[in-house]
Amino acid sequence: MKKSLLFFGILFFCIISTTYAQKTSEFFSKADAFLKKNVKDGLVDYKGIHDHPDALDALVEMAGKLSVSKDKVDEYQAFWINGYNLMVIKGIVDNYPINSPMDIDGFFDKEKRNIGGTQITLNAIENELLRGNFPDEPRFHFVLVCGALSCPPIIDEAYMPATLNRQLEKQTKKALNDPKFIRVAKNNIKFSQIFEWYATDFTKDGQRIVDFINTCRAEKLPDGAKVSYYEYDWTLNEMK
């Protein structure tokens, strides 16, 4: 009897595990297809999605039913990065047409979305589930896209557990070598306000922001340059 119970217990666990893996795999696959269709050159076709919302609505519903474990680090991070970006798109589409995500009251810190089996704000995804759980990972700032032009550009693919580190590295290097993102004029450098708002993420162990940026730049920033921050452009990152 005990052997039978053990057998059925193991069988049940295997079935549950297989079902979970299939559902998470389906989410990543469908998120990838959605982004490939609706994102180009870092801009989003909000009007097209607004006019034909079924694919996004299905993705959001799927994301709400999934629950990912922090123990599976790559899967967890990839899920919440994709989830954040999709929920930004969903929030904008639900209020479309708008000129900026800032037109929506409480967009980041009050509006809760059903994702990962919980009701959560965008700020909580970023600051608690990602930055809070993984404080030594500054590259999140180059893949979480807030729906504005000054955000690092959204990519036309989903972040995948198997390729996450490579994708994080690629997007970080792309941003830090982009002359629109890091603006250099002789001995004057202007940084995105991301580096001002989240300075502690880039200055671990006595490292300066310039040091962090230079680890990813082909052309190093000069030592002793005058540093300032340009104003964040909250204009919607919309495909025209």
Image (spheres, rainbow, N blue to C red):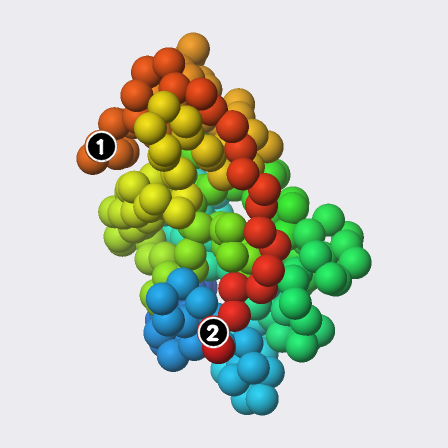
Residue 91 drawn above or below residue 180: below
Q: Which of these two is toward me, 231 or 198?
A: 231
How far across and how far down the image is residue 9, in percent?
44, 58
Residue 145 drawn above or below residue 32: above
Asked whether the viewer can see residue 37, the reply is: yes
Residue at x 34%, y 39% (from the top left corner): 176
How far across and how far down the image is residue 130, in percent?
52, 41
Amino acid type at image mark 2: Met
Residue at x 48%, y 77% (from the top left corner): 240
Q: Which residue is mark 2?
A: 239
How far across and how far down the image is residue 121, in percent?
68, 52
Task: Give the residue furthest to the left.
Answer: 218
Task: Give the residue furthest to the bottom.
Answer: 51
Residue 219 - label: 1
- For this view, does 140 lie left or right of residue 126? left
Residue at x 79%, y 58% (from the top left corner): 105
- For this view, does 68 lie left or right of residue 102? left
Q: Which of these two is toward me, 204 or 100?
A: 100
